[in-house]
Structure formats: C-alpha cells, structure tokens
Image (cartoon, rainbow, N blue to C red):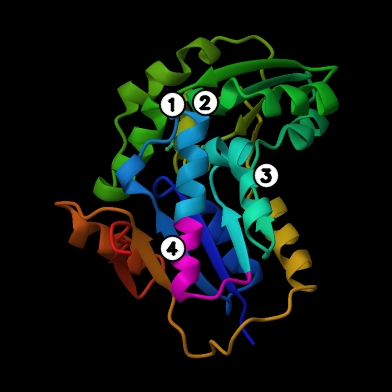
Amino acid sequence: MKPTILLYDSGMGGLTIYDAIRESLPDAHYLYCFDNAYFPYSEKSEAVLIERAVSIVQKIAENYPLDMVVVACNTASTVVLPALRERFAMPIVGTVPAIKLAAQISQTKTIGLLATKGTVVRPYVDELIERYAKECVVERIGSTDLVEIVEEKQQTGSVDMQRLQKVVAEWQSHPTLDTVILGCTHFPLVKEELQQLLPRVSFFVDPGNGIANRVVSLLQDVKRNVNNENKENQAFCTQNSEDFSKREKVMQNWGFKRLNVLNFDEK
Ligand code: DGL
C-alpha cells in the first residue's frame, strides 16, 4: 500500500523537499499544504509557528489518515517538532540547515548560512554549529526578502537579480567563503542565480537528499493506515487568494490534482 505523506511549508519552498522525496518514492500518496495565510514565516513568533503546525496537521489528518508528516520548512522545524511529536503518533520529519554536511565539505572551513531571519537566530541552530562546525567560521545572512523573491519566481518565472544581489552583497567579496548552506527550503529554487552572484562559492548545500533518505528509512517501520491506491495527490492552502487559479496551475505542474482551501472556521 502507498504511504500518505503530508508536507507543509509557508509557501512553495517545501516543493524542493517534495521533489527530492518523490525521486526516491515516486508512487507515494502526497499531500502538500502551503500556509499562505501566514506567509512568510521568517519573522513570525515561535508560538505562532507552533499553533500553525498543530492546526494544519490536525485539520488535514481529519480527512486523510497520515503515515508521515514532513515539516518542509527550516523556520518551522527549528521550533515545532517537539509539539508535533507530542500530539501526533505518526513519524514527524523536520528540515534543518545542513550544518554538519557543510562543515565536512568546506575546504576553507568558512561557511555561510543563508536562511530566514528567524532561523539564523534560533538556539537550535547555535547548537548544531557548536556540535558539528566548531572548527569553522560560520557567517549568517537572515533574509525575508529572499523568500519573497523565490515565491515571485514561482508565480512569474523570473527573478529580480538586483534585489537578490542586495541580499548576498556582503558575501560577494568574501575572501574565503567556499560553502553556502541553503537553510531555507525556498532557496534551492534560486540556486543558479545565487551561483551567478557568488562565483567563488564552490558548494551550495541543501538537505533534500538527506531528508529523502530519512523518509525512506522511517517508512520501513510504518504500518500503513488505509488503502489509498487510487488517491490523487492533493495540494492545500490556508486562505483563498486572487491568484488562486494561477497557484493551482503551479501545483498541478508539480503533480497535484487540485488545490483545496483549508477552512479553519468550521467546527
Ligand atoms: N521555506 C521556509 C524555510 O525553510 C520558510 C520561508 C518563510 O516563509 O519565511 O525556512
């Protein structure tokens, strides 16, 4: 039987994680929720992120028995995992900046963490650096703008390079930075543009493949909930918007049958 996997993010970023998982598990039943009512997550409080995580999983689980939840968002994962694991029995997989991998790859031992404003200041991230990258210099850029640039790219197909350049300006002349961690799931969607602006960086690290491996290995122990052989992949958002049909087309291009609006008001 196919496993049903729910991924959620504030926006389109989590699709980079979905893409990596889908490569390993092309036949799983996927549900993807983007929380457009609360986009962007970057500067939202920890309490809000926890409340959103619990509400979204609960709401979707009412209609779709879930075998696994993937929090396809670093900003949320650095905060919400304990609350989700306490409340829900299915395995919960998080996405956190690939600091260990970056520390192993970097030749110069100078790493850049490119993430949201929230993620770069989380104690969770400090702990990862202390644990895995003690011998490295870790520079941090926290940006909400970059998340919005990527979201725009998903809708329009183009990137405002000047705006993007401003985000990474301080690294363009960095003498030793050779590795950049894409610490927000949106950012792999502008990897090529970032490479153009940071030609001296040799490695851009994102956690997609690591997460896909983790999902595959955890699913081996999961007893499947229901027979969902004929279920279609579905996308969800948390509020209606003017660009709904445009967004639905984007999600259909990623392999989702329909875009549904989650209604949190009804009892
Ligand atoms: N994609 C998310 C992340 O990985 C959050 C983007 C946002 O809404 O700020 O951090």
User: Closer to the camera, 243 or 85?
Assistant: 85
Nearer the observer: mark 1 or 3; the answer is 3
Residue behind label 1 places its C-beta within 8 angstroms of ligand 1: yes
Marks 2 and 4: in contact by CB < 8 Å? no
Question: Mark 1 and mark 2 in contact (Cβ < 8 Å)?
Answer: yes
Label pair 4/1, CB-CB below 8 angstroms = no
The magenta-colored residue range is 56-67
Circle 3 sits on which residue? 82
Q: Residues within 10 Å of mark 4 (few under 14, many from 20)?
A: few
Q: Nearer the viewer, residue 46 or 233?
A: 46
Disc 2 Cβ-to-ligand 1 distance below 8 Å = yes
Magenta span dominant secondary structure: helix
Amino acid, disc 3: Pro
Front one among 143 and 126:
126
In the rendered structure, the answer to whether residue 249 lies left or right of residue 10 reads left
The numbered mark at residue 59 is 4
Toward which corner of the image does residue 140 lie, by quadrant?
top right
Outermost residue toward the left in this view? 242
Q: Is residue 137 left or right of residue 198?
A: right
Q: Does the residue tagged 3 have its C-beta within 8 Å of any atom of ligand 1?
A: no
Is mark 3 in CB contact (under 8 Å) with mark 2?
no
Q: Which is more foreground, mark 4 or mark 1?
A: 4
The magenta stretch spans residue 63: yes
Residue pointed to by mark 2: 118
| Real-space Cα separation, disc 4 to disc 1, in angstroms | 24 Å
Residue 90 percent across, percent down from the top left? 67, 65
**Mark 4: amino acid:** Lys
Identity of the residue drawn at 84% across and 19% down: 134
Q: Residues within 10 Å of mark 1 (few under 14, many from 20)?
A: some
